[in-house]
Structures are given as C-alpha cells and as structure tokens.
Image: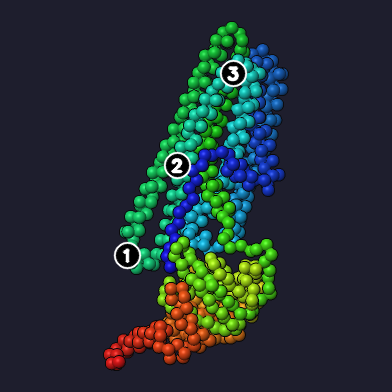
Amino acid sequence: MSETIHFEEEEFTTQFNGRTLIRILAQAKPHWKLTAVFLITIALVSALDSYFTFLSKRMIDEGIVPRNGERLLNIAVQYGGLIILQALLVFGFIYAAGILGERVQYDLRKKQFNHLQTLSFSYYDRTPVGWIMSRLTSDVERMGWLVSWGVLDVIWALANILTALYFMAIINWRLMLIVLVAIPVLVVVAAQFKKHILVEFRLVRKLNSRITGAFNENITGVRVVKALGREQANLAEFEELSEDRYAAGYRAAWLSALFLPAVQIISALAVGAVVVVGGVEAEYGAMTIGGIQAFISYITFMMWPIQDLARVYAETQHAIASAERVFSLIDAVPEIQDRSDAVDPGSLRGDIEFIDVDFYYEEDKPVLQDFNLVVREGETIALVGPTGGGKSTIVNLLCRFYEPRKGMIRIGGRDYRELSLHSIHSRLGIVLQTPHLFSGTIRENIRYGRLDASDEEVEEAAKLAGAHEFITALEKGYDEEVGEGGVMLSVGQKQLVSLARAVLADPDIFIMDEATSSVDTLTEALIQRGMERMLSGRTSFVIAHRLSTIKRADRIVVIQDGRIEEMGTHAELIRKRGHYYRLYSRQFREERARQYDLLGLEPAAT
C-alpha cells in the first residue's frame, strides 16, 4: 500500500436494550447441561440460606421460649443435615461456574480466531493488532465472567430476595410491604446511573485497545525506536494516551462508587422504617421474639443481595462494552468470499490474464488503472519500477488477497472469482522481502509448506533452496529453534528457510516479492540458485529491487503509476535505452562505486 489507512474504531453509543446481554448469555447454550446444574445448585443454596433463618425463628419460638428440648433437638438435627447438603451444593455451583466461564472463553477465542482467518487483507490493513489482541484477551475474560460469576451473583441475589420476601410475608405481610416500596426506588436510581456508567466503560475499552496497540508497536519496533532515539517522544505520546485512559477510568470508578452508597442509603431507610413499625407491633403482641429476630435478619439478608445486584449491574456495563467489540469482530464480513458455485479446478495451470483492471486501496487514489497483462503458462515475469508504482498490488490481486474494483483476472481462461479461495491460496508459493517464521524449529517452519511432508522431503526441499548447508552447520540442525518471528536466524537464513518452505509446497504459481533486497551478496547468490530450480516450469512473478537478479526472466515489465511503462527481455530493454536502461545503469554505477569504496580506490572517470 502506498499510504497508511488510519483506523477508526466503531463507536458504540446506542442505548442498552438487552440484545447484547442476551447474546452474551447465549454463549452458555452449548453447555446447557452444565448451566442447568449451575443454576439449580445456586438457587437451592439461596433457598437454604433463607430457610436457615426461618429455622432459627422456630428454634426460638418452638424450642427455647417454651423450653421444649425435644423440639429444639429435632430442629437442630434438621439444621445440621441441611448444612451438610448446602456445603455439597456450594462446591457444585462454584465448580460449575468456574468450568462454565472457562468454556465460554475458550469458545469465544476459538470463534474469533477462526473468523480472523477468513477475513480479507483489507480488514488487517485498517485494524491494529492491539485492537484485535484486546478482543481475544481482556474482553473475552469480561464476557466469561458475566456468563459464570456474574450470572451466579444475580441468581443468588434474586433467589435470596424472593425467598426472603416469601418468609417475611409468612411472618408479617404488612412489614414485608414496607420493604417492597424500597425496591422500585432502587430500580429508578439504577436507571439514572445506567446511561453514564455504560458510556464511560465503552470509552475505557476503546482506550484500552489503543494502549494495547501502542504497546505492540513499540515492542515489535523496539530496534527502530532505539536506533532513531524515539524513546522520549514515544513515552510522551504514550503518557498522553494513558492519561486519557486514566480520566475515563476515573469517571467510571466515580460513578460506580457513587452508585453503591446510593443503594445503601435507600436500604438503611427501609431498615429503619421496618424496625420502628415492627417494634410498635411487638408491644401489642403482633410479633413473637423469634419473628422479630428473623424479620430483622431477613431485612439485612435481603438488602445485601440488592447491593450486590447494584455492583453486578455496574460491572455488567463493562462486560457489555467488551462484548460489543467482540461481536463486532465476529460479525465482520470478509470483503472477499467464495461464490456459492465456486469450484476447485485441481490446478492453477494455464495463462494468467489481467484485463482492464482498476484497483485502489482508498477512494480517489487509484493504484492500477486499465491494467492489462497476459502471462503465458510457465513464463517468468519480473516486475520492476519505483516504490508505490503498483508492483506488489499486482501480485496481491493475483493471489486474490484483494479483488479488482473493475476488470477481470483470468487463470486458465476462467475468471478466478469462479474458483474457491482455498484452491488458489493452496497452490501459491510466496517468498516475501521480510519472511515470517513461526516459533518452533527450522524443520517445523519448512514443513509449514506441506504439513504431511516427511523429514526426508523437508530436507530435500532445503537442499533445493540452498538452505541445507547452513542448517546442518547449526548445533541442532533442523531441530534448531528459530525464536519468535525467526529472531535467532539472520535475515538471509530466514529467507532461505522461507524459500525451502515454498519449494516444499510445490506450487503452481511462484511469487518472489523483493526476496533478495535485504541480504548480502553471498546469500543472494544462494537464493538465486534456489530460485532457478524453483522457477523452472512454473508460472512465476518476481518483484526485484536489485535488477541484476532478473536478467534471466522471460519478460521484464516496468510498472510506473499503475501502468506498464516498458516490457521485454533484459537485452531488449537495454537496447531501447528507456526507463529500464536508466534504472539498470544507475544501479550498476552505484554498485561499482560501493565496490571501489570497499577497496579504498577512487572510481574511474566515466
């Protein structure tokens, strides 16, 4: 791409209407048996909590006050048996909640990872890695918490409130009505806080994504940062971003902190009213000693769950803000998809035709315009020209990482949009300017070209690519660890491993994108020999900065401003003394000057 596409994260400002929450809870549906055990056990634990208070009332009224030891013993035995049952149920719901949360997180991460592999390159062009990583980690954890521990807290609180109200009504229904008045007041207070809390939590998640992106860029680009002395400038930018995150987090924390005291004040007023009215009724004998004790216990017992619901509600806003971003990733639609009638042709043999192709990454900034090119089967085409002219775009379109905005690309006489994406991608061999190796051994990285390849086939591919000699010179040979991104190997060694990987894949179409621009002359010679073996009999595209590497191409195509400037063999273009001749001559003079400089000689007059 000629320019960077700036990422603008989708804003989530719609009022919470429950649909996102329902979608979060639906993640537990595949684990409905575990969810059922979880819900039943927590409901039973809550019911037992309320029943224990009722048993305490009976102990006082039926055993202690009338001094009935036998009755007191019977109730105590019942109490002890239920304690053992509750202990088992507590173990059950905590275990079920933990497992359920982990399974939901696993499902969401797997779903996101699988979906990420279906998305087009354009998605990654405009989406920072840090944003994606936040969705896969912290946001998924928030959702897993809500489905398990969040639901646990809600069910426990609701069951406690309902069972407490039930037993309070049995004891004294008039006092129970006083408590009921407090509940709508709490709902109104929650509604007022809801809007502001959700907005702040959404902003927190958005800024978290940007901070993760900044971390990622600075860690992966640490060598450039240090080389350019950018530490202080980067720190200043990061501090500004962190301050914005702190301010948003502070406002969210302030609102959440204010929410709980508001609930406590309302609860305290309700408790005070009940104590006054209950005390008056006790003077006239309308309440027993056990009833008063149980009723006060129930009030306290019920108000704690109400306060807990307030806490869960505030945290739920945070989880919803995370879920909106997770679902935005899962719902992202690939720009390039298989047609319903897409086929696998069995090979990508045949001529390749670019017919009146237009393409642009950004509107009104065309990269290719009315581009036409026919490549015969087995032909090696070299693409040269200035940076940003469209060379890499041509091969990206051929690989169907992008599709033409206008025009058509044919492979073997067929519009390549009629072919499945897998049938195209699985038959391409690509070696990039900056090869990417995965953490693991050299053998595993070469085998990535064909996962069912034997060790002998891996080593044969390395020999053909010219990589075998340096690999066997390593302490562990093919079992040498390459490190993250291949940091344990030199650029040239990584390039040779990448070439061996492409050789092992045995592709129908081979692409070399600036594969020798960052290596020394000796390694370039090794790569050239490997390329010659690889290109033989295959349709190939070579993008080259060093023009000396493409002399043997069947045709050299000079690309400038998205159009073909010149085309022909090396000898033909030199004789024309046009654009290619000027490029080649300039590079030849520069290389000769470097050689003289290394020898400490003055260049000869020209």
Q: What residue type is labelled 2?
A: Glu
Q: Residues within 10 Å of mark 1 (few under 14, many from 20)?
A: few
Reading the image, the residue beneath label 2 is 200
Tell me the quadrant of the picture where the C terminus can be found. Answer: bottom left
Reading the image, the residue beneath label 1 is 229
Along the line of sight, which residue is nearer the eye, 80 or 164? Answer: 164
Q: Whole-percent x and y of residue 289?
A: 60, 14
What residue do we see at 35% from left, 65% from top? Answer: 226
Reading the image, the residue beneath label 3 is 177
Q: Is residue 594 left or right of residue 117?
A: left
Element type at marker 1? loop
Q: Is residue 420 above or below residue 478?
A: above
Q: Which colour scheme is used?
A: rainbow
Residue 232 visible, this angle? yes
Q: What residue type is labelled 3?
A: Leu
Element type at marker 2? helix
Q: In this view, does 322 lie to the left or right of 77?
A: left
